C-alpha cells in the first residue's frame, strides 16, 4: 500500500473507485468498468493491486510527501505548462490520432493532450516510477469523470524502463496514422545517474562514436534526454506526425549538428525557448523542440520564444559544411571562417586545486588549509584563470601552481631527487591525487597533469576565457622571466616574441573576429569558446582585411605602450601561413 501514499486523489475519483471496489473483487470486471470510464487498459495489473488499493481506501492513511527526484533529472512538467504546450501544438494544426509519451511521469502532458486533442484514439505511455503510474491513472480517471461526454481513447500505460520498451514494434503497429511524440525526458547525464547507482540507464555504448580523450572525458558523458530524443526520432522518423519535447538547448544543438553526417528524416525544426527557472526552478537553458516527421532531412533550426512565437529569432545549423549559431550574421563574416594558422591550446588541468594552487605570502606559499608551504621556486609558476582574462595586458598572477611535467606522461620521479621540498609537499597529499576521479590520470605517473607541453612555456600568449560570453582576448606576458600558466577553462596561442603576440592580440580583438565568433559560437553553451570554435578563425584572412594603423590603434586602446611598428606588422602579414600545423609557426622563425 505504500505505493499509493505518495498520490493525492481528489474526492470524486476516490468515491468512484471505492464504489466499484465495494461491488466486486473480480479484477477483470473492475478493469472493464474503469476502461469504459477512462480508457485505461488494465487499470489494476492484478487482483493484489486492486485489493491493496481497496485497503488503502478503507483505512486512514496520511498523504506522504513524494521524494525529491530532481537528482534523477526528474523535472515534472507542471499542469499549466503542459496545457500551454498542448494548446500551442493544436494552434500549429497538429491533430494526432495517437499520442506517445515515453517518460510520462505524473501524466500532466497526457491529461493536457486529452483536453487539447479530444479526437485522440490511442495513448501509449511509459514510466519507470510506479507511484507516477498510479498518479497518472487516477488523473486520467478524474479527467473523464469531469468530461463524461468525451469518449476516452485506448490508454496503455506501461510501468517499464524506457530503455527496454520496444518502440520499433509500436512504430510498425501505428502504420499511417498521425502520431504525436510528446514529453519531457530526464534532464540528466549518464554519468550523474551512474554516480547514484541508478539502474535505468541505456546499455553502455559509445553512441556518439567518440574516440581517445573525447570518449574518456566530458564528451562521452551524454545527456539521457538526448539519448531518448534520438532513439524516438530514429524509430519514428518515417512515421506521419510530429515530435514535441522539452529538452535542454544542448540536446537540440547536438541533434542539428548530427544532421550533417547522420541525418534524420525530420523537417520544420524549431526551438521555442522557455523560462526554465520559472517553470522548473532550475538554472538551465531549455526549450520546446518541435519538428515534423517523415520529411526531407533539414539541417537548420529556428530559434523562437515559446511565450512570444511571433518574435522571430535566428536560425542555426549548417551553412554548407560550416556549423553556425546565427545564419544571417554569419553570411556577413563567412570569409573569416577557415583554419587558424596557429594551433589553439587549452590551459593545464590538474583536478587537485587544494594542493596544486598556491598563494604567495611573505616569501613562502600558502593554501587555504596550510598557511605556510615551503617549496623550491623552479616548478612554481604564476597561474591565471578565466576570471583573470579581462582584456588588455596582463603580466602578473594572483595565484601560483606547481607544474610537475613539461609534457603529458613525463616521468615525475625527478622531483624527489632535484626538488625534495616540493616532493615532500606533494607526497604528503598523495590521497588527494589518488582521489581524482577522471580516468585520464589512471596509469599515469604520480602528480600528473594534463594540457601541458612545449606550448605552455611560450613566454607570450594571447588568451581567452572559454566561459565568458564576450570574446575578449588578453595579451599575457611573462612574470619575472617565467611564462604565466593558464587553467583548463582558458584557451591560448603562444609566441616566442612580444611583437608577433601583440599583432595577433590586435587582430583577434578586431570587429571582424568578434563578429565571426558571435555568429558561430553558441551563447547558451556552458563553454562558449572552445578549441574547435577558435580554430576556425582564419587569422591570415583577418590580417589581410585590417590596415596597419588599425592594428596599432587597437594596441594603444588596450593600454599597450610598446606598439608594433610597420616593419613588424608587414613581417607578420608576410610570414603567417594558411593551415600551418603546430604552435605559432611562421616561416621566418621557429618557436622556442
Image (cartoon, rainbow, N blue to C red):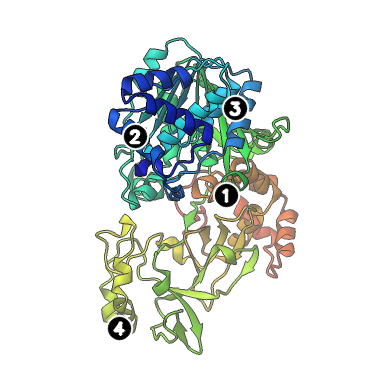
- Nearest the viewer among 523 and 106 is 106
The 10 Å Cα crowd at callout 4, few under 14, some 14 to 19, many 20 or more, is some
Residue 500 in the image, given as x and y percentages of width and height: 59, 60
Q: Which residue is mark 4?
A: 420
The 10 Å Cα crowd at callout 2, few under 14, some 14 to 19, many 20 or more, is some
Left or right of 261? Residue 112 is right
Q: CA distance from mark 4 to mark 1?
A: 51 Å
Under circle 4, the secondary element is: helix
Residue 43 is at least partly visible in this image: no
Residue 287's place in the image compared with 553, above or below, is above
Considering only order in the chain, which callout, 4 or 2, is on the residue closer to the N terminus? 2
Q: Which mark is residue 86?
A: 3
| Nearer mark to the viewer, of 3 and 4 | 3
Q: Which residue is mark 1?
A: 281
Q: Which residue is mark 2?
A: 161
Left or right of 554? Residue 367 is left
| Nearer mark to the viewer, of 2 and 4 | 2
Under circle 2, the secondary element is: loop
Considering only order in the chain, which callout, 1 or 3, is on the residue closer to the N terminus? 3
- Which quadrant of the figure has residue 445? bottom left
- Residue at the limit of the structure toward the bottom, as seen here: 362
- Residue at the limit of the structure toward the front, as seen here: 23
Q: Which mark is residue 58?
A: none
Residue 25 in the image, given as x and y percentages of width and height: 32, 26
Amino acid at each position: 500500500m505504500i505505493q499509493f501514499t505518495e498520490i493525492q486523489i481528489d474526492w470524486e475519483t476516490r468515491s468512484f473507485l471505492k464504489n466499484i471496489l465495494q461491488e466486486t473483487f473480480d479484477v477483470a470486471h473492475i478493469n472493464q468498468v474503469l476502461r469504459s470510464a477512462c480508457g485505461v487498459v488494465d487499470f489494476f495489473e492484478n487482483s493484489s493491486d486492486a485489493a491493496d488499493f481497496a485497503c488503502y481506501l478503507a483505512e486512514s492513511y496520511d498523504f506522504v510527501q513524494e521524494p525529491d527526484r530532481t537528482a534523477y533529472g526528474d523535472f515534472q512538467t507542471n499542469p499549466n505548462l503542459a496545457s500551454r504546450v498542448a494548446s500551442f501544438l493544436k494552434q500549429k494544426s497538429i491533430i494526432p490520432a495517437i499520442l506517445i509519451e515515453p517518460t510520462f511521469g505524473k501524466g500532466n502532458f497526457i491529461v493536457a493532450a486529452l483536453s487539447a486533442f479530444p479526437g485522440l484514439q490511442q495513448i501509449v505511455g511509459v514510466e519507470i516510477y510506479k507511484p507516477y503510474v498510479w498518479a497518472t491513472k487516477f488523473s486520467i480517471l478524474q479527467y473523464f469523470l469531469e468530461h463524461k461526454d468525451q469518449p476516452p481513447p485506448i490508454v496503455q500505460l506501461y510501468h517499464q524502463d524506457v530503455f527496454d520498451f520496444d518502440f520499433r514494434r509500436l512504430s510498425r503497429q501505428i502504420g499511417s496514422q498521425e502520431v504525436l511524440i510528446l514529453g519531457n525526458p530526464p534532464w540528466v547525464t549518464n554519468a550523474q545517474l551512474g554516480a547514484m547507482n541508478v539502474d535505468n540507464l541505456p546499455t553502455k555504448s559509445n553512441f556518439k562514436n567518440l574516440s581517445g580523450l573525447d570518449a574518456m572525458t566530458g564528451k562521452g558523458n551524454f545527456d539521457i534526454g538526448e539519448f531518448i530524443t534520438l532513439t524516438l526520432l530514429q524509430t519514428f522518423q518515417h512515421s506521419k506526425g510530429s515530435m514535441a519535447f522539452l529538452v535542454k538547448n544542448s540536446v537540440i544543438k547536438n541533434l542539428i549538428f548530427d544532421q550533417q553526417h547522420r541525418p534524420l528524416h525530420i523537417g520544420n525544426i524549431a526551438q521555442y525557448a522557455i523560462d526554465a527557472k520559472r517553470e522548473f526552478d532550475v538554472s538551465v537553458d531549455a526549450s520546446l523542440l518541435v519538428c515534423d516527421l517523415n520529411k526531407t532531412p533539414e539541417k537548420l533550426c529556428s530559434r523562437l520564444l515559446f511565450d512570444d512565437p511571433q518574435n522571430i529569432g535566428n536560425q542555426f545549423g549548417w551553412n554548407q559544411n560550416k556549423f553556425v549559431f546565427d545564419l544571417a550574421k554569419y553570411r556577413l563574416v563567412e570569409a573569416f571562417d577557415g583554419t587558424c594558422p596557429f594551433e589553439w591550446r587549452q590551459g593545464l588541468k590538474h583536478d587537485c586545486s587544494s594542493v596544486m594552487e598556491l598563494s604567495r605570502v611573505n616569501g613562502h606559499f600558502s593554501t587555504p588549509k596550510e598557511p605556510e608551504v615551503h617549496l623550491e621556486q623552479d616548478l612554481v609558476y604564476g597561474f591565471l584563470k578565466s576570471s583573470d582574462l579581462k582584456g588588455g595586458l596582463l603580466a602578473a598572477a594572483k595565484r601560483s601552481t606547481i607544474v610537475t611535467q613539461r609534457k603529458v606522461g613525463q616521468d615525475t620521479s625527478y622531483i624527489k631527487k632535484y626538488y625534495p621540498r616540493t616532493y615532500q609537499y606533494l607526497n604528503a597529499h598523495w590521497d588527494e591525487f589518488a582521489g581524482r576521479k577522471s580516468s585520464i590520470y589512471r596509469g599515469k605517473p604520480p602528480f600528473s597533469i594534463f594540457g601541458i607541453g612545449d606550448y605552455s612555456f611560450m613566454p607570450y600568449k594571447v588568451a581567452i576565457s572559454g566561459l565568458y560570453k564576450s570574446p575578449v582576448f588578453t595579451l599575457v606576458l611573462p612574470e619575472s622571466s617565467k611564462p604565466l600558466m593558464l587553467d583548463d577553462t582558458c584557451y591560448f596561442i603562444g609566441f616566442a616574441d612580444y611583437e608577433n603576440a601583440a599583432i595577433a592580440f590586435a587582430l583577434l580583438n578586431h570587429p571582424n573576429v568578434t563578429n565571426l565568433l558571435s555568429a558561430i559560437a553558441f551563447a547558451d553553451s556552458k563553454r562558449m569558446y572552445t578549441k574547435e570554435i577558435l580554430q576556425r578563425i582564419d587569422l591570415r584572412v583577418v590580417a589581410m582585411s585590417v590596415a596597419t594603423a588599425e592594428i596599432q590603434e587597437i594596441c594603444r586602446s588596450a593600454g599597450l605602450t610598446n606598439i608594433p611598428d610597420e616593419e613588424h606588422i608587414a613581417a607578420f602579414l608576410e610570414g603567417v601561413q594558411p593551415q600551418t600545423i603546430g604552435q605559432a609557426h611562421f616561416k621566418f622563425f621557429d618557436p622556442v
